[in-house]
């Protein structure tokens, strides 16, 4: 449970970073794209012996690279959707996408263990909490939603999380442990980020400045640790993706809401307070309490 708590804390620190970007005129896209080398270097400092890598079969190695590129693609889709649809609908599509890895792991891959009444009730309460805690979608904004883009965000995040759990369960031990596994994924992420940076720099759409580049460091450090501890949590829970990702996703939403309320004076609606209460019940049920 400690690993999961640490992963949630570092994930919330990521969101706090994003909250500060506007104040320091940081182009968030640059910070995110450059944070992947920071993550890779941090992992290397923790385990220099991970290099040279012990790559698995050609197919599995390709999946690792695709998974890393998938992180960049989901970020881009989320950014496009936020521009076209707004933050609230995009956030909702992202959060509800959790249903994809949960259902696939429970009913197809059969890695979720036995579905007890406590887990079934916990998942039900958790999905309800995610809905209630998500930002309010303003139906009177006059903006016509791009449904295809919202669907792309939903599918991309869902499939990325599913592949993430599957590769962790099948390849981590084979490639030498958690840190080599992370570094191999990050190679794909860095490759994808380089393509995006070159393309957008050529188009002149990136706001290159000192703060945007330096912001990659305080972003990359918590990003690495949130990723590292999430993998360790999956190992501790016998790679029970349905339970771990549900608790992780929900806990990040709950802690983010509380952090925003306490430190940034962001007011919560009654619907979101209800979601927080339901979420606490969901987490308790998932832990068999």
Image (cartoon, rainbow, N blue to C red):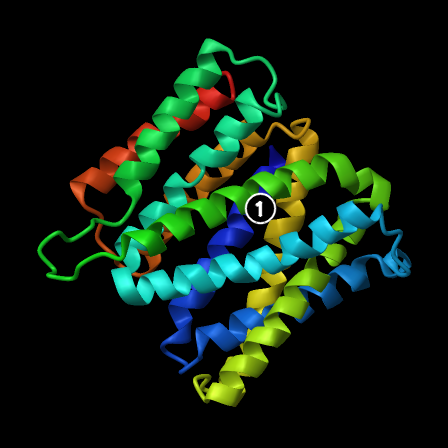
- Residue found at x 63% / y 75%: 194
Q: Quadrant of the N terminus?
A: top right
Q: 136 left or right of 211?
A: left
**Image quadrant where residue 237 sits:** top right
Q: Nearest the camera: 142 or 1?
A: 142
Residue 31 spot, x, y in % from top left: 53, 74
| For residue 119, above or below residue 162 | above
Q: Mark 1 points at which residue?
A: 7
Q: Around disc 1, counting alpha carbons within 10 Å, would you say few (fewer than 14), some (14 to 19), or many (20 or more)?
A: many
Position of residue 266 in the picture relative to residue 27 (left or right): left
Going by the image, does 124 lie left or right of 55? left
**Residue 25: quadrant of the picture:** bottom left
* Whether residue 261 can be seen here: no
Q: In this view, does 208 lie above or below 274?
A: below
Q: In this view, does 199 lie above or below 134?
A: below
Residue closest to the eye, 59 or 131 = 59
Left or right for 70, reference 65 = left
- From the top left corner, tell me how far across and down residue 273 is, in percent: 24, 38
Q: Residue at x 89, y 51 (%)?
A: 54
Residue situated in front as seen by the camera: 82 or 156:
156
Q: Residue at x 45, y 10 (%)?
A: 117
Residue 229 visible in rendering: yes
Total number of numbered labels?
A: 1
Residue in the image at 44% along x and 27% along y? 283
Closest to the observer: 174 or 277? 174
Residue 17, image x and y in percent?
Answer: 46, 66
């Amino acid at each position: 449970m400690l690993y999961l708590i640490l992963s949630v804390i570092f994930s919330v620190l990521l969101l706090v970073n994003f909250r500060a970007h506007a104040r320091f005129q940081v182009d968030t896209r640059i910070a995110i794209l450059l944070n992947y080398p920071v993550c890779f270097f941090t992992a290397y400092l923790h385990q220099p012996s991970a290099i040279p890598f012990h790559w698995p079969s050609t197919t599995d190695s390709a999946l690792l690279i695709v998974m890393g590129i998938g992180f960049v693609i989901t970020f881009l889709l989320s950014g496009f959707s936020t521009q076209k649809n707004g933050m609230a609908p995009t956030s909702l599509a992202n959060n509800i996408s959790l249903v994809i890895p949960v259902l696939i792991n429970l009913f197809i891959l059969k890695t979720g263990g036995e579905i007890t009444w406590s887990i079934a009730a916990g998942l039900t309460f958790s999905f309800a909490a995610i809905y209630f805690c998500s930002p309010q979608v303003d139906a009177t904004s006059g903006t016509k939603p791009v449904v295809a883009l919202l669907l792309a965000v939903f599918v991309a995040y869902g499939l990325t999380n599913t592949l993430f759990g599957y590769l962790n369960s099948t390849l981590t031990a084979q490639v030498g442990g958690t840190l080599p596994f992370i570094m191999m994924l990050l190679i794909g992420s860095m490759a994808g980020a380089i393509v995006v940076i070159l393309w957008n720099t050529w188009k002149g759409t990136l706001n290159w400045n000192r703060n945007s580049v330096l912001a990659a460091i305080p972003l990359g450090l918590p990003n690495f640790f949130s990723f590292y501890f999430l993998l360790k949590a999956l190992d501790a829970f016998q790679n029970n993706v349905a339970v771990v990702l549900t608790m992780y996703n929900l806990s990040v939403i709950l802690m983010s809401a509380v952090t925003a309320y306490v430190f940034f004076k962001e007011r919560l609606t009654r619907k979101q307070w209800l979601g927080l209460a339901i979420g606490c019940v969901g987490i308790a049920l998932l832990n068999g309490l």
